Amino acid sequence: MKTLYGHRDLILYLVARDLKVRYRRSVIGLVWTMLQPLLTMAVLAVVFSSLFRFNIRNYPVYALAGILFFNFFQQSIITSMNSLRGNAGLITKLPVPTAVFPISTVLSGVVNLLLACVPLVAIVLITGHPIKPAILFLPVSILIAAVFTLGAGLILSPLAAFFHDIVELVGVFMTLLMYMTPSFYPMTIVPEKFLWAVRYNPVRSIMEVFRDPIYYGKIPPMNHLLLASGLALVALAIGVFTFRRMSDRIALYV
């Protein structure tokens, strides 16, 4: 940790660089971070209001909160896995801790998530969805989501450096995970025989801690909050352990 803190300027530089590179060829730049989840929410609202009849009050807010979380998680994981090979020149030429690269990608993901919350607030105000004091808990929810995502990124990023097919496999798994996470549908529509897959999905627990203050206007129940926090800390501990065991060999593979 002390070594990483000593390279905090490099981490901040990498965060800024990641944000610039992501939107370098985009006409509207960072605005796309806010526009993309809005467009996704609009499509889902049209499709599900026509084909399905969810008993969900103010579906746009419900769906958008879930979309924002899952976009953050998915994009941060994918960019974390690409971060080591993408910075091969720095890794092989400079004595920097390789962990700064997945860390910086998750931090840039948090910045994107914060920007994407702007249209969420707009939708909340436009639809008249009640804003309750529990919304002040949202930074804690984002911190838990970031810790969980960082842990997963630290596990997967060295594996992606060693085995390039991992990125493609995880991309397919993310699609499956998206449908296993009730980000845009209620758990009540899940058939009983598949309910266990959704219920025991750790990403669902983290997402609900993020959505509760926004949509339900409540601080997550203590047992749920402890579960999500525990999952995040366990993921981080495993990620740190895994990354340390593999970090010495990363420069040989990137």
Image (spheres, grey):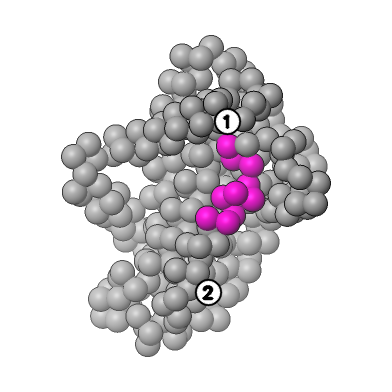
Dominant SS type (magenta): helix
What amino acid type should be assigned to the residue bearing mark 1? Answer: Leu
- Left-right relation of 110 to 176: left
Q: Secondary structure at mark 1?
A: helix
Q: x and y percent of residue 172 in the render?
A: 50, 62
Q: x and y percent of residue 124 in the render?
A: 51, 19
Residue 51 marker: 1
Residue 36 marker: none
Image point (68%, 46%), residue name: 205
Tell me if residue 34 can be seen: no
Image point (58%, 37%), residue name: 184
Q: Residue furthest front?
A: 51
Q: Distance from label 1 to label 2 (Cα)?
A: 45 Å
Crowd rating for badge 2 (residues with CA inside 10 Å; few <14, some 14–19, many 20+): many
Q: Quadrant of residue 86?
A: bottom left
Disc with the residue nearer the chain's start (1 vs 2): 1
Q: Secondary structure at mark 2?
A: helix
Q: Residue furthest top?
A: 128
What residue would you read off at disc 2? 243
Which region is colored magenta? 175-184
The answer to whether marks 1 and 2 mark residues whose Cβ atoms lie closer than 8 Å is: no
